[in-house]
Structures are given as structure tokens and as C-alpha cells.
Image: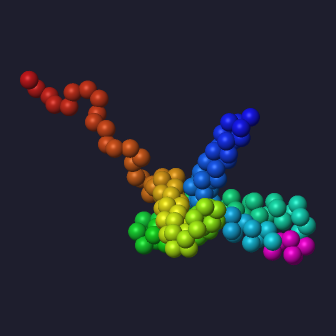
């Protein structure tokens, strides 16, 4: 029974370490969805309506952000959109890593060091997820694949 408890603790810790990386891209949509959901609840939408409005807003924010990142041609605009997703994720990674560090590290300096490294890792993961999950949108008339040679012989004569 003791072995099962230890194994379940390892699995639980693994899930808590995996979650910040897997959910890092969704920090900005979560924040916006929660903000709009709370506002709609205070405006009188009721609990169910506020939850629905929050979920729809969060999903819309994620889709619009990824589409805007894929459509943007300018590196500066892509940088700004990527930072909109990466900065909240880095902040969330900092807070989660600092909370984990408080569990077992007595030195304040080491806790802060691990928290900063966690923020960099989670923010970088969010940046990579935003940039990899979107395909660059094509302009009208642009080919979607490399130019293929025509079938058959291309020269005449012999």
C-alpha cells in the first residue's frame, strides 16, 4: 500500500509540473474570459450566463490571437502578439514555480532563482506554442506548396 501511495504522489507531482507547460498558451484567454465572465455576472447575466460568456470569450480570444499571429507579416506585430500570450504565461509560471519552491527550498534566494527560471521556461513554451500552432496565412494567388516540376520529359530532341 505504501508503494501505491508513493507512485500516486509521483504521478500527481508530474501532473502539477506538466500543467503549467501545457496550459501556458491559454493564460491570456483565461484571464480575458474570467474578466468578461465576472463583468457579465455583475451586470446581471447570472452564474450560467457568466460561465458561457466567459468560455466563449476565452475561445474567441485564443482563435483571434492565433489567427492574427498567422496573418501578420511584420515581425514587430508578430512580436507584440506573441508577447501578449507569453508574458501572462511567464507570470503564471513564476507564481506556480515559486509556490512549488516554497514547499521544499528554505533559502529565499534559491526560491526566487527557481521561480525566474520557471517563468522563463513557461513563457518560452507559450511563445513556442503560439508560433507553432499557427500556419502562415497565404495571400490570394500564393502557392501553398513548393513548385513541382511538370510530369514527363521536359526537353525535346535527342
Along the line of sight, the residue nearer the viewer: 148 or 29: 29
Q: Position of residue 91 (x, y in %)?
A: 58, 70
What percent of the width, then of the height, locates residue 77?
46, 71
* The furthest residue to the left: 158
Q: Residue at x 81, y 71 (%)?
A: 38
Q: Position of residue 59 (x, y in %)?
A: 68, 58
Display colour scheme? rainbow
In the rendered image, the quadrant that contains the N terminus is top right
Q: Is residue 147 magenta?
A: no
Residue 28 found in image quarter: bottom right
| Residue 40 drawn in magenta | yes
Please indicate whether residue 155 sits to the left or right of residue 54 in the image.
Answer: left
The quadrant in which residue 100 appears is bottom right
Does residue 17 appear in this view? yes
Residue at 8 percent across and 23 percent down: it is 158
| Front residue (pair 119, 114) | 114
Q: Can residue 70 be seen in this snapshot?
A: no
Q: Foreground: 144 or 153?
A: 144
Instruction: Give the magenta part as a residue range.
Output: 39-44
Amino acid at each position: 500500500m505504501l508503494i501505491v501511495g508513493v507512485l500516486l504522489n509521483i504521478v500527481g507531482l508530474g501532473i502539477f509540473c506538466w500543467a503549467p507547460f501545457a496550459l501556458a498558451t491559454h493564460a491570456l484567454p483565461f484571464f480575458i474570459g474570467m474578466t468578461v465572465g465576472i463583468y457579465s455576472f455583475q451586470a446581471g447575466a447570472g452564474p450560467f450566463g457568466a460561465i458561457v460568456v466567459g468560455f466563449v470569450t476565452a475561445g474567441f480570444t485564443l482563435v483571434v490571437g492565433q489567427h492574427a499571429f498567422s496573418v501578420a507579416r511584420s515581425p514587430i506585430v508578430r512580436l507584440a502578439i506573441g508577447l501578449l500570450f507569453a508574458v501572462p504565461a511567464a507570470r503564471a509560471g513564476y507564481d506556480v514555480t515559486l509556490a512549488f519552491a516554497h514547499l521544499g527550498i528554505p533559502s529565499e534566494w534559491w526560491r526566487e532563482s527557481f521561480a525566474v527560471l520557471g517563468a522563463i521556461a513557461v513563457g518560452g513554451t507559450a511563445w513556442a506554442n503560439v508560433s507553432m500552432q499557427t500556419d502562415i496565412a497565404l495571400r490570394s494567388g500564393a502557392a501553398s506548396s513548393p513548385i513541382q516540376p511538370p510530369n514527363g520529359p521536359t526537353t525535346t530532341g535527342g
